[in-house]
């Protein structure tokens, strides 16, 4: 390290002290302190905020990095995001997905030499955050009580990039941790106090590695040192005893260990040890299980329609019409967006990149309203598409009138007069062949409107893998992107669809979509839909139609005949600031897709967001300039920013709710939940194939070869642990994680009540017969 770099480290340490932070000198390449609590008045890491002591420290160790203790000593904890390049796991990408979905405040942030991030958050007043490793998400660590981080401008040997401030203190405040992240950090803290079973703690291969609690050997060394420190020993006794109890140490061993290191033995020490064993000692069965059981009934709640992001007329229509109908405004808003997209002619395109003359997008989107029959899917679709249906009906009647006039011509006149052809804006319940015929003379595209999308997928031979289904899927996939499409039909000759372009809108119930998702081919057809998970319906109002319904109808009609693009432009394009926003979103989408923490189907859905962002921008742009004399050529930064927020804060979070909630954690989700409910209702501590076959109707028909994969999945989810029989021929049985009966006690009671109610209903039917 050069002299100037050494001066920078001292300056960084002094700057931290001026902010009221304790600092300590850390050896380069190590996450520990040159100093010891034993020789620093009991101060952990030997940390101080005394400027004279800091100057002395860096005079003694001039090459030292700047270490910051985390936890209440400095009032903050740090979320450490690793990168795939630096640590082999993309914590940064996985965290970005969650942050984009649930929101993250601006806070003090540092960049690490490996390209990762340190996010600083205020310590909560009422709970403590402890260190954890990969428990929030793979590649996401937390440094809390007893932990530390290296602060800028610290360096890593062999790496040119130093730690650096991205959001520097002084320019940014340390933010409060958002609720979703705080909950995850607290759950990770709980896991940190319950390390892995004793069977894995003695292997020599763990030298130099972190424990399953996220602690290194140096962490434990510091903790043990505190047993002898005034002012720190009682807290250290509690933490040491809790950690040892959770790892299977006997009370006698823990007492002897603490007596050796702690100079005081009093009631407080005894009570701390006793409490540790009551809370954290695992029994013999619980030691088979590491981690918490997965909540098979958990879900991501879809967000409500946000304010201030949609064009004003669309938001007003969605909210006012939703109140009138007692329907979810989110469904009305997205159905209206698809309707507007179908109304805008496909000749209105946007150039995506500044220097790419091949990538253009037209306003073409697909959406599915997902909900039970009681969510008013059909009324929502009817209200949102009514103006477009009126236009299409008028086009059809005009064609019928022209056909009547043409049919009245003599044969000679008919040969000289082109036969009128129909232009369509709406197609319902049509086969692929009928859709092809309708689109031959509709170059601006059309909307496929399906009251139930089950019928749409049913047209493709129940979405199977047959040749006919494959051809149908190829047609619909092509219609999502638009462009020419050649037809070669037996008996009817060849034809060319100038622009095969479809906007798709429909409703579907959760059960059929699960079946479709389970059977789907890996062609991404389902993933092209924006899924909107509808909230339950409410009682509407019996009142005249609100005035905004008329304004919305006028808007759709205006979009059908847009003004020319200003300056004689042939296409829309992004302004410089808007282009910058688009590039940032593109990078975020790439990170989301590459993370290992999301399902393959959701990653495929996010893979469409680069183009869909542009398509949404066209809709916003055209709606907000509808009726103008000229359509501005440049899409503004304000439009791009609002569309980006709508895409990530609303549409992406609905995708989360759909892929993680509606589709479930597994293709076998319903059967897994049934077995789990049986375990809870019967308070089972072990389960066999025979137990499963004694369950409810969905379980009784299962064969042994069906049951074993299900139990293996439950084991992977932390519910079960396989125990082999005494002989190779013995049937296996499965231990139940005792934690499930505590964590899901309310669910267990609800399941017992549900089953008892079902029995009473059946008994009543039998008695009545």
Image (cartoon, rainbow, N blue to C red):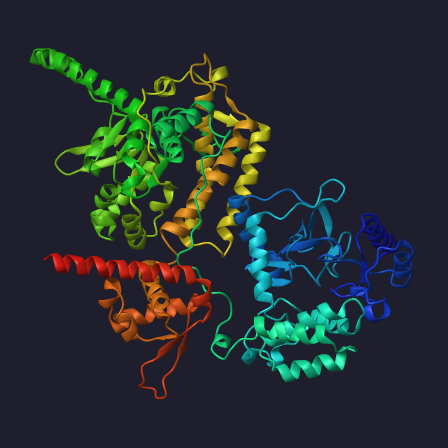
Nearest the viewer among 729 and 503 is: 729
Image coordinates for residue 552, horizontal then vertical, percent: 37, 21
Q: Quadrant of the N terminus?
A: bottom right
487 or 514: nearer the viewer: 514
Up/down of 619 relative to 600, above or below: above
Q: Specify whether 243 is left or right of 223.
A: left
Q: Residue at x 23, y 48 (%)?
A: 469
Note whether 241 is above or below 482 in the view shown: below
Residue 425 seen in the figure = yes
The image position of residue 232, as x and y in percent, is 76, 67
Q: Nearer the viewer, residue 209 or 721?
A: 721
Query: Picture quarter containing residue 554?
Result: top left
- Going by the picture, which residue comes out furthest to the left? 411
Q: Is residue 88 visible?
A: no
| In front of the other: 479 or 19 | 19
442 with respect to 14 (left or right): left
The quadrant of the image that shows the C terminus is: bottom left
- Name the outermost residue toward the bottom: 727
Q: Position of residue 310 (x, y in %)?
A: 47, 29
Report whether 429 appears left or right of 56: left
| Up/down of 563 relative to 443, above or below | above
x, y percent for residue 233: 75, 70
């Amino acid at each position: 390290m050069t002299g100037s770099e050494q001066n920078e480290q001292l300056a960084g340490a002094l700057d931290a002290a001026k902010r009221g932070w304790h600092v300590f000198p850390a050896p380069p390449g190590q996450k520990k302190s040159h100093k010891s609590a034993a020789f620093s008045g009991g101060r952990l890491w030997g940390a101080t905020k005394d400027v004279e002591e800091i100057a002395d420290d860096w005079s003694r160790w001039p090459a030292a990095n700047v270490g910051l203790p985390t936890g209440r000593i400095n009032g903050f904890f740090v979320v450490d995001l690793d990168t795939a390049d630096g640590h082999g796991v993309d914590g940064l990408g996985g965290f970005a997905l969650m942050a984009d979905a649930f929101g993250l405040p601006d806070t003090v942030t540092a960049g690490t030499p490996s390209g990762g991030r340190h996010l600083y958050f205020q310590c909560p007043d009422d709970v403590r955050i402890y260190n954890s490793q990969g428990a929030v998400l793979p590649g996401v660590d937390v440094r809390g009580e007893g932990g530390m981080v290296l602060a800028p401008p610290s360096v890593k040997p062999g790496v040119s990039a130093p730690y650096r401030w991205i959001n520097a203190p002084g320019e940014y405040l340390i933010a409060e941790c958002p609720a979703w992240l705080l909950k995850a950090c607290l759950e990770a803290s709980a896991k940190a106090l319950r390390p892995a079973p004793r069977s894995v703690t003695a292997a020599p291969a763990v030298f130099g590695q972190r424990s399953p609690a996220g602690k290194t050997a140096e962490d434990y060394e510091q903790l043990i040192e505190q047993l002898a420190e005034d002012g720190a020993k009682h807290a250290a006794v509690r933490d040491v005893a809790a950690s040892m109890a959770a790892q299977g140490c006997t009370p006698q061993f823990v007492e002897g260990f603490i007596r050796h290191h702690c100079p005081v033995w009093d009631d407080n020490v005894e009570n701390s040890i006793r409490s540790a064993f009551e809370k954290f000692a695992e029994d013999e069965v619980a030691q088979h299980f590491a981690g918490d059981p997965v909540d098979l009934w958990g879900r991501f709640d879809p967000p409500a329609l946000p304010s201030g992001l949609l064009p004003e007329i669309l938001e007003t229509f969605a909210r006012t019409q939703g109140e009138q109908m007692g329907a979810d405004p989110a469904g009305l808003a997205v159905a209206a967006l698809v309707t507007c997209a179908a109304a805008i002619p496909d000749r209105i395109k946007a150039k995506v990149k500044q220097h790419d003359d091949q990538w253009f997008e037209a306003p073409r989107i697909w959406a599915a309203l997902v909900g039970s029959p009681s969510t008013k899917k059909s009324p929502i679709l009817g209200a949102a598409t009514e103006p477009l249906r009126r236009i299409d009906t008028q086009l059809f009647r005009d064609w019928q009138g022209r056909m009547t006039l043409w049919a009245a011509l003599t044969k000679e006149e008919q040969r000289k007069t082109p036969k009128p052809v129909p232009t369509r804006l709406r197609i319902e319940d049509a086969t692929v062949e009928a859709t092809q015929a309708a689109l031959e003379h509709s170059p601006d595209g059309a909307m496929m409107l399906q009251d139930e999308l089950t019928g749409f997928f049913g047209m493709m031979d129940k979405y199977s893998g047959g040749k006919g289904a494959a051809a149908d899927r190829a047609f619909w996939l092509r219609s999502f992107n638009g462009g020419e499409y050649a037809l070669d039909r037996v008996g009817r000759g060849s034809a060319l669809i100038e622009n095969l372009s479809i906007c798709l809108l429909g409703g579907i119930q959760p059960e059929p979509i699960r079946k479709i998702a389970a059977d789907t081919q890996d062609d991404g057809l389902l993933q092209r839909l924006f899924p909107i998970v509808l909230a339950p319906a409410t009682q509407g109002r019996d009142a005249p139609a609100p005035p905004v319904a008329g304004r919305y109808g006028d808007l759709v009609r205006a979009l059908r005949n847009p003004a020319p693009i200003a300056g004689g432009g042939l296409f829309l394009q992004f302004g410089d600031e808007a282009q910058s926003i688009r590039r940032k979103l593109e990078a975020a989408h790439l990170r989301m897709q590459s993370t290992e923490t999301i399902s393959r189907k959701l990653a495929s859905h996010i893979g469409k967001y680069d183009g869909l962002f542009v398509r949404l921008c066209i809709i916003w742009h055209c709606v907000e300039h509808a009726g103008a004399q000229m359509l501005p050529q440049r899409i503004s930064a304000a439009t791009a920013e609002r569309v980006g927020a709508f895409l990530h804060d609303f549409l992406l979070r609905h995708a989360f709710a759909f892929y993680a909630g509606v589709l479930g954690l597994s293709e076998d989700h319903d059967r897994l939940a049934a077995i789990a409910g049986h375990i809870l209702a019967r308070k089972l501590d072990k389960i066999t194939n025979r137990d499963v076959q004694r369950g409810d109707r969905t379980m009784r028909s299962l064969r042994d070869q069906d049951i074993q994969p299900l139990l293996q999945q439950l084991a992977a989810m932390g519910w079960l642990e396989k125990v082999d029989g005494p002989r190779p021929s013995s049937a296996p049985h499965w231990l139940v994680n005792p934690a499930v009966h505590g964590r899901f006690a309310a669910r267990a009671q609800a399941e017992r009540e549900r089953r008892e109610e079902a029995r009473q209903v059946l008994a009543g039917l039998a008695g009545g017969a």
